[in-house]
Image (cartoon, rainbow, N blue to C red):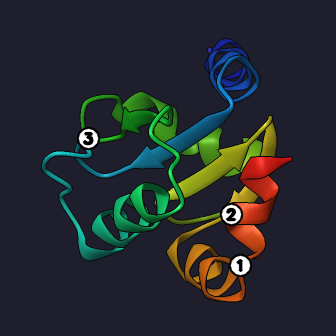
Amino acid sequence: MTTDLKQVIHEQVTGNRVALYMKGTPQLPSCGYSANAIRILQAVGATDAACINMIQYPELTAPLREYANWPTLPALFIKGEFIGGSDIMTEMHQSGELKKLLEE
């Protein structure tokens, strides 16, 4: 079952230019880190981000941790590549690196 769920995650991250696994929704984030991630994506113009609410899909939590080798939420993927969580997103946004990556 975990393998099937990893395949679902793989399809989500490769089938969307931007995929964000978060707590809550973009309209109603359930934690400060997820809210920060949404603010950053909006600031860099990533309006096409697929946002997956991990509260709604808790069965994806363990497979996501293995797939990304990352223990916490949010988890950002761009063009199929794992980028990081809220802190990494903040650093990349402040340096301009995140916007540049999205424009490539």
Whichever of callouts 1 and 3 sits on the residue coming sooner in the sequence is 3
Tell me, yes or no, whether the two marked residues, 2 and 3, touch with CB atoms within 8 Å.
no
Q: Residue at x 62, y 14 (%)?
A: 1
Q: Secondary structure at mark 1?
A: loop
Viewer-side residue, 68 vs 81:
81
Badge count: 3
Left or right, 77 with reference to 56? right
Q: Could you tell me the amino acid type at mark 1?
A: Gly
Q: Residue at x 80, y 57 (%)?
A: 101
Q: Of callouts 2 and 3, which one flags the residue occurring earlier in the amino acid sequence?
A: 3
Q: Point out the frontmost of discs 1 and 3.
A: 1
**Depth-wise, is mark 2 or mark 3 nearer the camera?**
2
- The residue positioned 79% from the left and 36% from the top of the image is 79
Label 3: which secondary element: loop
Give residue 93's quadrant in the image. Answer: bottom right
Helix, strand or loop at disc 2?
helix
Callout 1 crowding tier (Cα within 10 Å): few <14, some 14–19, many ≥20: few
The residue drawn where x is 51% and y is 73% is 86
Q: Quadrant of residue 98?
A: bottom right
Q: Which residue is mark 3?
A: 55
Label 1 to label 2: alpha-carbon separation: 6 Å
**Residue 94 position (above or below residue 35):** below
Within 10 angstroms of label 3, few (less than 14), some, or many (20 or more) residues?
A: some
Instruction: From the top left corner, tell me how far across and down residue 9 is, in percent.
Output: 64, 26
Q: Amino acid at mark 2?
A: Lys
Residue 69 in view here: no
37 and 65: which is toward the camera: 37
Horizontally, residue 40 falls left or right of residue 65, namely left
Which residue matches tag 2? 99
